[in-house]
Structure formats: C-alpha cells, structure tokens
Image (cartoon, rainbow, N blue to C red):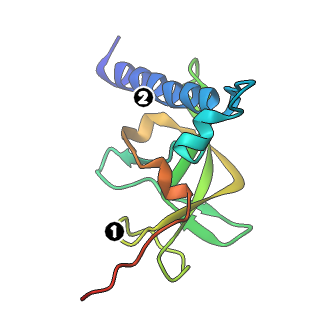
Amino acid sequence: MNHEKRRNHFLCEALNDIKVLQDIMKDFHSKYFGQLLVKIVGSDTIPFFLITHNGSHLRLMDTVNQFETEYFRIEGVDIERCRGTVSLLRAYDYEGKDTNLIADVVRLERTSTEKSIELSGISAIQLLKPDMLKGKFIIEPKW
C-alpha cells in the first residue's frame, strides 16, 4: 500500500472511530439513568476540523444559511471509497456573531447541512471539546 493510500486509510478509520463514539453516546440508554452519556458529555457530537495538505483548515460553505465554517460533525464514512459525510457546525463568538477564529469561538451549533468530502486532500483531523456545543460560557470580571 503506497503512502497516500495508507494515510487515507488511517483518516477513514479515525473518522469511523469518531462516528462510532458519537453513536455510543447517542444510543446508550439505561433504564435507570436514561441517556446518561449525553448528559455527562453534554452533547452527542464530537466536533473537529480537518487540516489539508497545505496546512490550512478545510472550509465549507452553507449556501442556504449563508455561512462558511471549518467545524464539522461526522455523519457517515464510506471506508471503501474513503469519503466522509459531515454536517456543518456554525461557530459563534461571545457576541453571537459568526466566526471561524478558534480563539473567538465560544459556541458551535449543529446545522442540518451535510456535505460529502473526499479525504485524499486531508492530512489530519483535530478534535475539539464537545462542550463547545453546550453554549454556556462565563465572562469573568476583569477586576
């Protein structure tokens, strides 16, 4: 297996692992505690961004809601074709405005927009904190 095919295979496996973990969080149900894992984590989403071969973050556009994002949730993985289906996560700053600057992002919001991506142009996956989907943040006083 050549280097690029091996890298794509690892990316597909990694995305598939993320998908499996999300499904466990979402589908685990206890008769005594309900959806305990979702309650503990606060979300059924593991957010991430993808890094391209040139070192930049992959950005995709939601043409309906008119926003661009580099934050995603995995919805499905086709390991044979090494393609992933992601839903776009909309990023907001503390004022509720769209942002893609990781230092300014305080909340990620799931959207219904899904895109299929070819993983041959991707070199890495960076996971983010699931609590970014909770939308809770505290601004502490300066003094």
> Is 113 in front, or is 29?
29
Q: Earlier in the sequence, mark 1 or mark 2?
A: 2
Indicate the secondary structure of the residue bearing disc 2: helix
Whole-percent x, y for residue 119 in the image: 48, 35
Relative height, residue 15 to residue 46 (above, below): above
Whole-percent x, y for residue 21 in the image: 54, 28
Q: Is residue 124 rendered to the left or right of residue 41? A: left
> Is 2 in front, or is 18?
18
- Which label sits on residue 79? none
Report the residue at 56% width, 20% height from top. Answer: 79
The reply to whether the C-beta atoms of the residues labelled 1 and 2 are less than 8 Å apart is no
What crowding class fits label 2: few (fewer than 14 Cα within 10 Å), some (14-19), or many (20 or more)?
Answer: many
Q: In what quadrant of the picture does the C terminus appear?
A: bottom left
Q: Residue furthest bottom?
A: 143
Label 2 is placed on what type of residue?
A: Leu
**Residue that mark 2 sits on:** 11
> Is 67 in front, or is 7?
67
Q: Is residue 76 rendered to the left or right of residue 71? A: right
Whether residue 85 appears in this view of the structure is no
Indicate the secondary structure of the residue bearing disc 1: loop
Q: Residue furthest front?
A: 32
Q: CA distance from mark 1 to mark 2?
A: 26 Å
Label 1 is placed on what type of residue?
A: Ala
Quadrant assignment, res 26: top right
**Residue that mark 1 sits on:** 103
Whole-percent x, y for residue 67 in the image: 61, 70
Quadrant assignment, res 106: bottom left
